[in-house]
Amino acid sequence: MEPAALAGTQSGTSHASALDLRFMVKRFGAVTAVNDVNLAFSAGEVHALLGENGAGKSTLMNLAAGFLAPDQGEIWVGGRQVRFGSPRDALAVGIGMVHQHFRLVDAFTVAENLAIGADDVSPRTSSRQLNKRADLIAEQFGMPVQSARLVGTLSVGEKQRVEILRTLSRGTRVLILDEPTAVLTPEESEGLCENLRQMAAQGTCIIFISHKLKEVLSVADRISVMRKGNLHATVPREGCDVVSLSRMMFDDVSDEFASVALTPYDGARSDVVVVEDLVCSDDRGAAALRGVSFTVRDHEVLGVVGVAGNGQQELEQVITGLRQADSGTVRIGGEPVRDVRSAMGAGLAHIPEDRMGSGLVGSQPIWRNAIMRNYRTAPVTQGGVIRAKVARAYAADLADRVDLSTRDVGVLVQHLSGGNAQKLLVGREFDGDRRAVVAVNPTQGLDVKAATTVRTRLLEARDRGLAVLLISADLDEVLTLSDRVVVIYEGRIVGEFTDAASHRDVIGRYMGGGHLSAESPGTSDSDSGATDDSD
Amino acid sequence: MADGIVASAVATAIGGSTAILLAATGELLVEKVGVYNIALEGVMLVGALSGLIADVNTGSWVIGLLVGGLFGALFALCFGLITVVLRTDMIVVGVALIFVALGITDVVGSKYVGVSVPDPIPKLPIPGLSSLPFFGSAIFSQSLITYLAAALPFGVAFLLSRTRHGLNMRALGENPHAADTAGIPVVGWRLFYVAVGGAFGGIGGAVLTLGIIGAWITNVTAGQGWIAFAIVFFSGWRPLGVLLGAYFFGALSVLGTVGQVEGWDLPSEVFTVLPYVGTVAVMIIRAWSQRRRGGISWPAALGLPFYRG
C-alpha cells in the first residue's frame, strides 16, 4: 500500500535512464556473484544480458527487481535513486521480472492469477469481473489469453504469457525476463521475440537474460556480456555475430558443439532397450504415456525431444524401474524391468534430470555417493559391512578418472559445482558393466565446458557399444548427439527422424503438436533446418 | 427413543461443537495462507485457562472470551515467529509447544481447579424459533457464541471466494512466490493469520471452560485441538466442510450420553473413544475418496517454508 522507498535527489541529466545500476555488488558467502557492475538501460530498447551459467546475470536482475538486496551499489530509476526492500517496492516504480520458473498459482484461473496483489481489483470480486479485467489487460497488451482457464492446464508458452501480462499490468516500464525461451518450442520463442519487439516499440524497456547467442542477435538492440560476476562489455547489436559474442562470453572461443560429433557406425546393431506399448499415468492419475513403443540399439543414441511435461518424466521413470506402468513392457538386453534393482541388474546407467535430488545425495560426502551402485557387493561390502577404506579408495580412483576438481572424497557433494557433481554422477553410472544409458537433460544448468565433457562421455559410451536414450529439452543437443530422434507429444511418439539435423524445423513443429496438421516428416521442407544447426 | 433425549442430545452436540468449530475455522484461515499450526491443542489450552482466569477476576464472560482469544493469538504468534520467520519445522515446533502449553497451564491452573466460573456464558434462546416443535429448542436455545461460531464459516467462505483479500490469501497458500512477485508481504500476512487463527483457537478454548464444561480441569481440551486440526483436512479446506465436520464430531461425542440413557449395552469407554476413532476413520475414507477422484485439494504450498529468490 505504501509507495516505494524513494530516496536521494533528482538527477540533473535530461535523459534519465529507465533503469540505472551503479556499482552493484552482491556476495553469497565467499562468492562474489556480482562484482561492481555499472549498467544503464533505456526506455524502448531490448537489452540482452548474455553470459554463461553463473556469470551473475540473474543475480544482477534479482537485485534490480527487489528480490535480492545488494551489498553495495545504487539503483536509479528515471533519475531518482531508489531502494528496494521487496519486489513490491520495485513494482511500484515500474520494474517487474518474469522468472525462469513461473510464479503462478496452478489452481487459479488466468484471471485470478492476474488479480493477485493488484490494487485495481475491487475489494468484492466475482469471477465474471475478474475475467473481464483479464480480457481487458490481454487486449491492452496484445497478448491473447483464455481468462477462465486454470493455469495448471496451460502450456508453458501460455503460462509465460500470463506471467508477462501480470507484470505488465502492474504498470511495468522495465520488464526483465530471465531466460524466457529456455522452455519454449522454437515457434513459441519466435512469437515471444516478436511480442517483445512490439513492447519495446511502445516505449517499454525490455531486459532479456539469455545464453543463446542466435536468439540474442535476433532480438536485442544492445547486448551486455557478463563474465564471472563482472560486466565484460556492452555493445550494439550491429556488427556483432556469433563468433564475436562468444569471444566476449568465454575466455577461449569454441563452438558449443564443435568438439562433439557422432562418428558413423557401420557395424550391425541389435536391440538393447525394447519398449513396448507403455501406458502409464502420472501422480495425479492422468494419462501420461498413451502407448509408447521404441527400441534403442547398441552403438546408438536415440534422442527423445518434446516440450517439458509431455510424458518424458514418466517414460524415464518406467524405463529405470522407478514407476510402475499400467501396461506394456520394458526390456533391457532381454531382461524385463520390474523395479530399480532389475533395471540396474540389466546394466542400465541412469543420469536423472534432478542430479542433486535423485542422482546424488548432497548432504553426503563424495565417497558415499560414489559407491551407491556397488555398495552391496564385494569388495566394497563384506559380510554386510561397508568397508570405508575400500570405498574411499574406490571413490578416489573414480574422482581421478573423471577429473573432479577435488580429490578429497570426504567433501560433501552439495559443495561441488554443478559440472563436478555431474562428472561424479556420470562417472559412477558408467563405471562397470553397462549395456544401456538413460540420460535426462544431462547438461541442464552446466556451463559450456562441463556440458561438453558430459556430451563427450555420452558419445564415448555409445562408441563403446552402449545403447543411449537421451531425453532432453535442448533440441540442439539432441540433434547433435543422436543417431535417431523421436518426438514425444502428449504421451505419444508422434514422429521419428533418422536425419534429424536436417529436419530441425519439422521437429520443432512436431514438439508443439504440429503433426496434427497432417504433414509427414518425409515430405517437409527442411532447408532452413539444415543450416540452423551450426550454433 | 424419547424425543426429549434426542432433542437434548442435538442441543448438546451443537453447543459442544462450538469450541472445535471456532478452532477449526481459525486453523482453516491459517492453512489457507500456507501454514499449519499443529500446536492448536496448545493454543486452545492457553485460551481456556486465560479466559477462565479473566472471568474469575472480572466476572465477565465477554472479557473472558476476549482474553482467551488474546492469549491464544499470542501463543500462536510464538509458533509463527519460530516457524514462519525462522523457518523451522512446523511439526517439531508445534508438538513441543503443545507440551509447553500443557505444562504451563497445569502449573498455573492448579490454583483454579474446582473454582466455579462466576459468569458463565449464558444461553440465549431466540424468541419464537426456540419454541418451534421438535428441534426448535435444541437448535435455538444456544449461547450467543454458538450462533456466531455457526455463522463464522459462512463469513470465511465469503472472504475466501468472493473478495480480493481472500484471493490474495489463497495465493499465499498455493504459491507464496507468486504472491511475493505480485507484491504481497508473505511473511507479514502469514504471521497475521497465524495470530488470527490463534485468537479463534483461544476463544474456542475459553468457550470450553466458560461454557461447555464450566470449570478448569488439567488438560481440559483433551484432544479437541487435534480434532479441530483433523477437521480442516477432513473438510478439504472448505469452510462449510469445517462446519459439517465440527457438528459430526459433536454428534459422536454425545452418542455416549444418549447410549447411557437408552441403555445400549456397550461399555462407556466405547463412546469416549468414538470421536477419536471417528477422526481416524473419516480421514482414511477421505484420503481414499480423494485419491480415487484424483484431486487432492490442499493448498499447494501448505507447510513449506518460504525463501525468496
Image (cartoon, coloured by chain):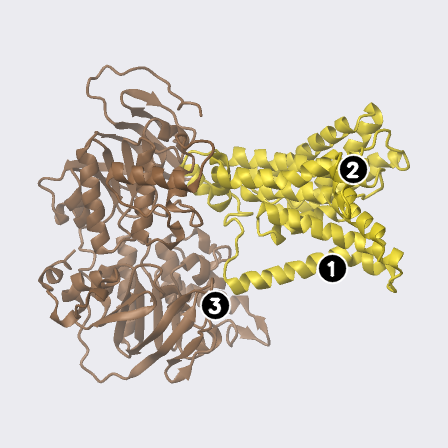
Q: Residue at x 41, y 59 (%)?
A: A355
Give the answer, above or below, for where A396 lies relative to B217. Answer: below
Is B123 left, or right, of A299 in this rendering? Answer: right
Q: SS class of the residue under badge 2?
A: helix
* Chain appearing in yellow on the rendered image: B
Q: Residue at x 27, y 23 (%)?
A: A78
Q: Name the residue carrying label 1.
A: B277
Q: Nearer the viewer, mark 1 or mark 2?
A: 1
Q: Name the residue carrying label 3.
A: A371
Disc 2 residue type (three-letter): Ile
Residue under mark 3: which chain is it in? A
- Quadrant location of the N terminus of chain A in the rendered image: top left
Q: Name the residue carrying label 2.
A: B104
Residue B101: % across, % down: 75, 40
Q: Residue at x 42, y 38 (%)?
A: A116
Report the front residue among B286 and B90. B286
Give the answer, above or below, for where A156 lies relative to A370. Answer: above
Structural distance between the alpha carbons of marks 3 and 1? 46 Å
Along the polypeptide, which appears first: circle 1 or circle 2?
A: 2
Q: Residue at x 74, y 47 (%)?
A: B224
* Chain appearing in brown on the rendered image: A
Structural distance between the alpha carbons of marks 1 and 2? 29 Å
Disc 1 residue type (three-letter): Val
Task: Residue A381: name its quadrant.
Answer: bottom right
- Quadrant location of the C terminus of chain A in the rendered image: bottom left
Residue B182: % across, % down: 40, 36
Crowding at dot 1, Cα within 10 Å, few <14 / some 14-19 / many 20+, comes out as some
Residue under mark 2: which chain is it in? B
Are circles 3 and 1 on residues that touch, CB within 8 Å? no
Report the front residue among B133 and B199. B133
Is B301 left, or right, of A62 in this rendering? Answer: right
Residue under mark 1: which chain is it in? B
